[in-house]
Image (cartoon, coloured by chain):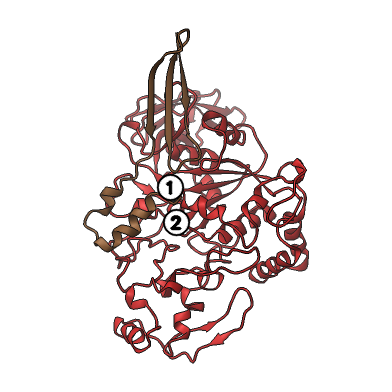
Chain colours: A red, B brown
Amino acid sequence: MRITRRDFMKFCAMSAGALGLTTTDLGKLEKALATEQTDGGTHVVWINGAACTGCTVSFANSMYYSSVQDLLVPWAKHGLTSTTNGTTANGPLDLDFIETLSSAVGQTALNAASANLGTSTTPFVLCVEGAIQTEGSNGNSYCTVGDNFAGNNVRKFKDEVLEYANRSNCLAVVAVGTCASFGGIPAAKGSVTGARGLISTGRITGGYQTVNTTGYWDYLKALPTGKVANVRLTDLGSGYTANPAVTFTLGGYTTLAAATATANTTTGKIASVVMTNQGAGYTSVPTVSFVGGFSSTGTTAKGVASLSNALSATEWATIMGKTVCVSGCPPHPDWLVGTIVYVLTYKEAPLMDKYHRPLDYYQEYQCTNCTWSVNNPSSMGTVHDIDGLAKASTAGLAVGNSPYLFRYKYEKNYEGCIGILGCKGRKTKADCSYRRWNTNTTGKGGTGWCVQTRAGCHGCTDPRYPDGWGKFFSFV
Amino acid sequence: MATTIIVDPLTRIEGHSRWTVTVHDTTGAIEEANSQGTLFRGFENILKTRDPRDASQITSRICGV
């Protein structure tokens, strides 16, 4: 076990409360963290794009649920004891590849990750850190990782993400941080790289600029590949005695598509059309014709071709269902560890809000437990603590959203609400106010958080971050 | 005649990097050595026309280590 039993049960109880688990489900959750993994644990592949690596560093600082070494190191396998809590069980995660922490370099390191590709059916979790940059002229890219094994051709990061995510043995795609979730700082106004997250922000107005970053999955769903996907029969024809030839005309191709049609000689109708060559370079839908094969009294079949996009509708639906956004700049290690453990236990994504953020951690606004709202009589909400410390409540008056009211709150009481200084907390969802940051003891809540320093929340978990908010230090 | 060794990606760094070395097979002399930064985000472009007080918050996201 990576944490003391008491703290583990506290974590289970907290999660159970949030997720509505029954006692039988609790047992499953317990089993995931407590079972000695003889095979080394669930595989995790962590790839970086346009990242600053802050998310990895935050993950490495995990302490509340489990220290990161207790998650990763197979202590029992090597006959060792954990230095943080004396456990001897194997860590439940087998981190195949992570660029920032891997001791192997180059192709050797990537081979451990690509073992999950090809014909592998072993389940793995994909963690994506950093934005995906889709621009680049002449087939070049602003972010490349690794050789593609064919001479001096580098592998684009955007292709790597699709390669790992669009597989049935990929249990979940965890977008770590706001950059991988919604675009974040690399996608801010002025960037030329076409940076985007995995999930679309939707159109958000009212900030420094209107934010409307299309997520990578939505972008791929609409991206034409220049190939013909299939031919849909609109008229099955009649009187067929032999298979007709299928011809494709027009469409502006560089390589002509080809297909074979099979006729059912008993009914005299076409049974199916199968693509033998999807062609290439199509800029518009080609015309499909069926030639010959039917008797003089029969009628020709008709069909309509459709062009394929980088992600088909079913592929898009599957990937969207398994994409979890653990946003934040950086995200709290608890949010990430908690989400990964959930995926290990249930082999699917947790309950999420409309931006694919797990509801466990992104449900409350920052004012929930803010110290400065306690000191200010014109505040909102009651105060509680993740460690179960004493509750305090405020005589909350109705609050408005005007800068005048906020300046009144700030000046009336020297320790009042700092909304006027640019705190985005009342519009940002995250549990920083009671989980807090930088715990130095396993099982204990954090020592502080951004607003505690009277610096103001920058709203980093939100899809608006950073441009949807306006300036960092102005009232929102 | 000459062997090219490619190390891509370089690990345990922030960001992405690619290093190639071409070594002569018999003499062991290094014929060519290249290092390449394989990630560009363009922070200078992002900072243009912004409030100067935001600069520290944005440039700190160049590296999170």
Which quadrant of the figure contains the N terminus of chain A?
bottom right
State the image coordinates of residue A17 (x, y, percent, origin top left): 67, 72
Residue A441 located left or right of residue A25: left
Using a 10 Å C-alpha cutoff, classify the residue at mark 2 as few (fewer than 14 neighbours), some (14 to 19) or many (20 or more).
Answer: many
Residue type for callout 2:
Thr
Question: Which of these two is toward me, A389 or A279?
Answer: A389
Q: Which disc is residue A51 wearing?
A: 1
Residue A272 sits above or below residue A365 on the image: above
Residue type for callout 1:
Ala
Residue A4 located left or right of residue A104: right
Toward which corner of the image does residue A282 lie, by quadrant? top left
**Going 64% across and 61% down the picture, which residue do you hit?**
A65
Toward which corner of the image does residue B54 lie, by quadrant? bottom left
Residue wearing tag 2: A178
Q: Mark 2 lies on which chain?
A: A
**Going 60% across and 58% down the picture, which residue do you hit?**
A339
Q: Which chain carries label 1?
A: A
State the image coordinates of residue A146 (x, y, percent, origin top left): 47, 32
Is residue A182 at all visible to an observer of this figure?
yes
Q: Which disc is residue A257 wearing?
A: none
Residue A216 sits above or below residue A412 on the image: above
Question: Which of these two is toward me, A357 or A227?
Answer: A357
Observer-side mark, 2 or 1, equals 1
Using a 10 Å C-alpha cutoff, classify the residue at mark 1 as few (fewer than 14 neighbours), some (14 to 19) or many (20 or more).
Answer: many
Determine the CA span between mark 2 and mark 1.
Answer: 10 Å
Badge 1 marks a residue whose secondary structure is loop
